[in-house]
Image: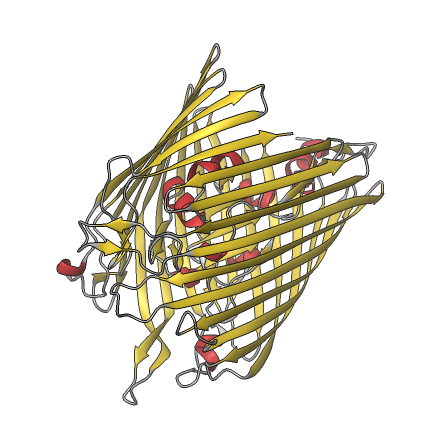
Amino acid sequence: MGIKRSLVLFLSSYGCFLFGQEKVVDTIYIFDSQMNKVKLFHPVKTISTEDAKKNSSNLSELLRFQSAVYIKENGRGAVSSPSFRGTTAQQTAFVWNGININSNFLGQGDINNISLFGYDQIGIKAGGGSVTYGSGAIGGSIHLNNNLDFNKGFHGILFSEVASFNTYNNLLKGAYSNEKFSFKASGNYSVSENDYEVKEAKNYINRNGQYYNTNFNIAAAYKIAPHHQVSWISEFFNGQQHYPVLFNNETETKYRTQNVRSLLSWDWNKTQFNNSFKAAYTEENFQYFAKADGPQTSGGTGKNYILKNDFNYFFNSKWNFNVIGEYQFNKGEGYGSGIDHVSRNMGSVSGLLRYFPVADLRLEAGIRKDFVGKISSPVLFSFSGKWNAIHWYTLGLSVSRNFRAPSFNDLYWQPGGNMDLKPETSYQFELRNQFKVGDLQMSAAPFYLDIRDMIRWLPTFSGYYSPVNTDHVRSYGVEAQMEYMKRFGKHLLKGSLGYTYTNSQDLEKKKQLMYVPFHKFTGNIDYQYEFIKVYVQGLFNGLTYTDSNEKRSEALEKYFVMNAGLGLTFHKEYTIGFKVNNVFNEVYYTMFAYPLPKRNYSVSLNINF
């Protein structure tokens, strides 16, 4: 295997290939310079903008139907959180263009306060990734990625949708690029009255469920020299959610949030090495209103200043060494939470060594040390291997130690914050088996997680809640996937079927954790003939307990939900879409007491120009 092949494998994450004469061939620039390296060793499910339009209501719906992640949603469009492999929302890392964006206060991300259409790709990676992506990457990570291309001229997209419950989704995206310069901008706006009814669920009406959100993205890149490129991207999000109430006499509440993210990158690519230096600023603002028409009663502002450097050096065609250094200064100010002005310094150093002994075998070992204020953080490690044993079978192995640092709420909330908390840590093992028979691909990945010092808020003798390190959780199961794609003449058929079994127990109680279903199936079928596209989605979710004692009377019953859609394309640029969600009118819940909508509809228009 020559040096050229190694460079193709590793430098693709920078959007260009370098050859012996170091001539740059334009392709695509990806802001997350680690993502293509991660894909060399771990499966990452990638959802494109086109796939996202199948579940255009919000990001929660997209992840529910197109991934193995369990999504707990307090009614459509309300507070929503993910669970990978039986872990908590705080143990999921949200990564925006290579930068961890979990909230300083909550230690997690609210899915419905993240735009669905602000990104070119959404990546979903199950399993630990703290060596690369830091705190929170225990159960898995959700990657929100943007890219820029060169030599493409001008092109754009307009997407507009009208849906049930007075819901409107709109997206406008435009891009221009030449040999040296690339620019892209997009904006989307979603709004909904969201007043659906489910009579079978005690005459439930989604009262006070309205929401809206606006998101703007702008990005640019310029090649200042043959081997140097500067890039910039910024995102601005503004949203409001009203929290559903169960009865007419309940007080209506609402929540507002404004997020700003900006990233500047300088990339230096040579044959023997490459380096990506990033400076980023992220800001979260949120306000809670105990009365929807009253003044703000609580809220907070968090600001993060981030410097990150990713250096790769190629010893030869078989050995590659990667060093990642990061520094963050985190600031937080709470209102109505007892949190005054707090701050902390965070730093980390990671080293990854990759070895390609033969063409069909690749190995990676990593180590990381974090420095989180006065908190004692563990040394983390990872080992991954991938072996193409024979042409139809590939074996993959992953072992890692991961962690989550306590959030500002965990440490400083008054009353109740606990300054003596230890970080959550986990050990993970995963064995991936991949098979390919003709046009059919299958995989089965048994996994095991051992989580220590889980942070849990418990009642105190003084009447308030306080976080403590209590739980020892063991989670094990299997993720299986089957994919098929066949093109015959003018016909294209694609199908996928996924299954996840998860047993996640508090070892003290020997009970399944709340909101962790034992079984989840997802299925997608796409058929295209000339200008006609048809797709069907299916989701089966098994019995799900909503408390820590496996109380059967309060468990969420199993359910099957199916969606279907049709698209008609004219003149290669105009597509009219029609979609039916919940075709069989199923009554189902992902959160106790808050059912999701029954059958509903949407009509859309997509224009490429």
Where 221 falls versus 361 (above or below)?
below
Where 248 falls versus 139 (above or below)?
below
Q: How many marks?
A: 0
Instruction: Name the quadrant containing residue 438.
Output: top left
Give me the residue at 63% from left, 59% from top.
261
x and y, in percent, of residue 428 in the image: 40, 55
Query: Between 382 and 117, which is closer to the camera in this rendering?
Result: 117
Instruction: Name the quadrant containing residue 539.
Output: top left
Give me the residue at 47% from left, 84% from top.
338
x and y, in percent, of residue 84 in the image: 38, 53
- Quadrant of the frame with the C terminus: top right
Q: Find the residue positioned furthest to the bottom.
A: 462
Instruction: Name the quadrant containing residue 562.
Output: top left
- Quadrant of the frame with the N terminus: top right
- Judged left or right of residue 408, residue 592 is left
Whether residue 149 appears in this view of the structure is no
